[in-house]
Amino acid sequence: MPAKKSEAEIIKNGKKVITIEKREINSLEKRFNDTAFAKNFAEAVELIFRCKGKVVVTGVGKSGIIAQKIVATFNSTGTYSIFLHSADSIHGDLGILRDGDIVIVISKSGDSSDVTQIIPLLKTLKLKIIAIIGNMNSEIAKLSDIVLDASVKVEACPHNLAPTSSSTSALVLGDALAIALLQKRDFSREDFARFHPGGILGKKLLLKVSDLLQDENNIPKVSVDANLKDIIYQISSKRLGCTCVLKKDKVAGIITDGDIRRLLEKNMDGLQNIKAKDIMNSVPKIIPPNILARTALEIMEENKITQLIVADKKRKVLGILHMHRLIEEGL
């Protein structure tokens, strides 16, 4: 029966793992100050950048899992990549390889038989090999065209066995390659959006104000000469907390429910003579329909308002965007 660990011991052990892995990442960072390592990294980025085919990332065990994550990061940042399980490769999966491909091999030991046995086959196909390796004296390191040292002094595992620090170092080095390639390609936010159309990230990058507008019959609007009754009806019935004020079908201002409350507080007499033009904000915030929804949200937050009028270049009202609509979309 294992000894029961106290809460303090559990917290201490968890923190120790992070400390050890952070130390190894710091060591990896310092390797960029070494001329040979820096040169190898730059050559790896240049080789992948010039690749006419695809980048095939391979590994087994924990290295294979890290390889899959690197593939995902490559693909989402503009580097065409696939994962090849080293063990499956000799059972037909080598058929995915083509002229012009580049292979990235990830291995802690550098001597795994599942990996070493495919290296000669890759050489036969004349494919360039980049190794992210934990043992610079290993067989894989000797056979690869470019070697990136991902070795660690100690794993975070108390027995120094389970891949922890080593898998983190390989992952970070893969991220470094991916982002260096992203920057070399001038991969933009718009490029990123094309590969991330779904979920909250996709909405932040792609969703436009025009995608969120109500149909014309549900736009609250009154003329500049509308009376208070009509104004209140539009604000209440359309449930947006405001109404556009139009003059010759163009936006002249906006009236919010807050404007109505302030009017009632100050002036209870002569309300029947009040017109929309008397209480409207004549300089409302107006946005075009083609801007991103997240930009509209930023405008609302900056100006501490919850509605924006959406209009075309001629100030013809197209709708009202309410913050609640943005919240519904998860922005």
Image (spheres, rainbow, N blue to C red):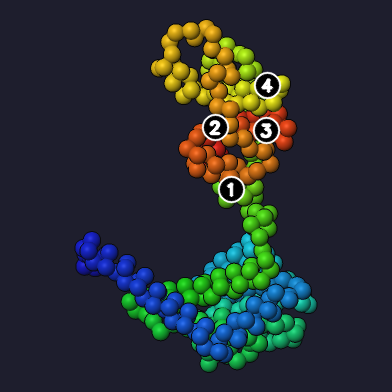
Distance in Å between CA atoms under marks 1 and 2: 19 Å
Q: Mark 4 or mark 3, which has the lower sequence index?
A: 4
Q: Amino acid at mark 3?
A: Ala
Q: Which residue is mark 4?
A: 247
Q: Is residue 236 left or right of residue 217?
A: left
Q: Mark 2 or mark 4, which has the lower sequence index?
A: 4
Q: Mark 1 or mark 4, which has the lower sequence index?
A: 1
Measured along the vertical axis of the image, is residue 172 above or below residue 279? below
Q: Which residue is mark 3?
A: 311
Between 1 and 3, the one lying in front of the other is 3
Q: Which residue is mark 1?
A: 204
Q: Mark 1 or mark 3, which has the lower sequence index?
A: 1
Q: Which residue is mark 2?
A: 307
Task: Classify the position of the N terminus by image quarter.
Answer: bottom left
Q: Amino acid at mark 1?
A: Lys
- The image position of residue 102, as x and y in percent, is 70, 77
User: Looking at the rendering, which quadrant does residue 70 occupy?
Assistant: bottom right
The secondary structure type at the circle numbered 1 is: helix
Distance in Å between CA atoms under marks 1 and 4: 34 Å
